[in-house]
Image: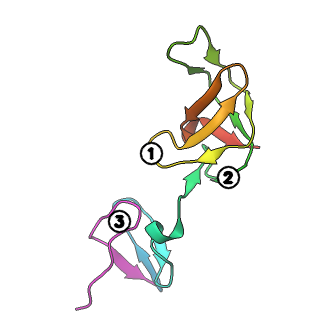
Amino acid sequence: MTEMPKCPECGSTYTYEDRGLFVCPECGHEWSQTAEPAAEAGLVVKDANGNLLQEGDSVTVIKDLKVKGASGAIKQGTKVKNIRLVEGDHNIDCKVDGFGPMKLKSEFVKKN
């Protein structure tokens, strides 16, 4: 029996093949046999709506975000221009007007 590849999203070993695609029953991710692994594809960051974000994109904050050490919060609807994508939990590096350099989570922004 041939060895099935691990899921590139969650690392599960329980993948199976269905009509030319590999499927992960744990997270539901599907990929083709010819697709390159996620590690080689580069950094993949998606916004709250599932849109792919790229370096230099402009985004809008979708909820009020409390900022440690600041007297206020970043308000919903704040536009952030020229983002940079980085590895880690807070995967957007940017400059927010009125707050300065900041790291944001992609789940709290939407692409403009």
Tag 3, which secondary structure?
loop
Q: Residue furthest top?
A: 71
Image position of 12 with respect to 1: above or below: above
Q: Nearer the viewer, mark 1 or mark 3?
A: 1
Instruction: Give the number of the disc on residue 88.
Output: 1
Q: Nearer the viewer, residue 108 or 103?
A: 103
Magenta range is 1-18
Say whether disc 3 or disc 2 marks the residue closer to the N-terminus. 3
Say whether disc 1 or disc 3 marks the residue closer to the N-terminus. 3
Q: Nearer the viewer, residue 45 or 82?
A: 82
Q: Nearer the viewer, residue 16 or 96?
A: 96
Instruction: Give the number of the disc on residue 25.
Output: 3
Image position of 88 with respect to 13: above or below: above
Q: Residue at x 47, y 86 (%)?
A: 20
Q: Quadrant of residue 54?
A: bottom right
Viewport quadrant of the N terminus? bottom left
Disc 3 to disc 2, C-alpha distance: 32 Å
Tags 3 and 2 touching, CB below 8 Å = no
Tags 2 and 1 touching, CB below 8 Å = no
Q: Main secondary structure of the magenta part?
A: loop
Q: Residues within 10 Å of mark 3 (few under 14, many from 20)?
A: some
Tag 2, which secondary structure?
loop
Query: How far from the left and from the top, in percent, is residue 23?
Result: 41, 72
Residue holding disc 2: 55
Q: Residue at x 61, y 16 (%)?
A: 73
Query: How far from the left and from the top, in percent, is residue 99?
Result: 65, 21
Q: From the viewer's perspective, tell me whether residue 97 is left or right of residue 53.
A: right
Say whether disc 2 or disc 1 marks the residue closer to the N-terminus. 2
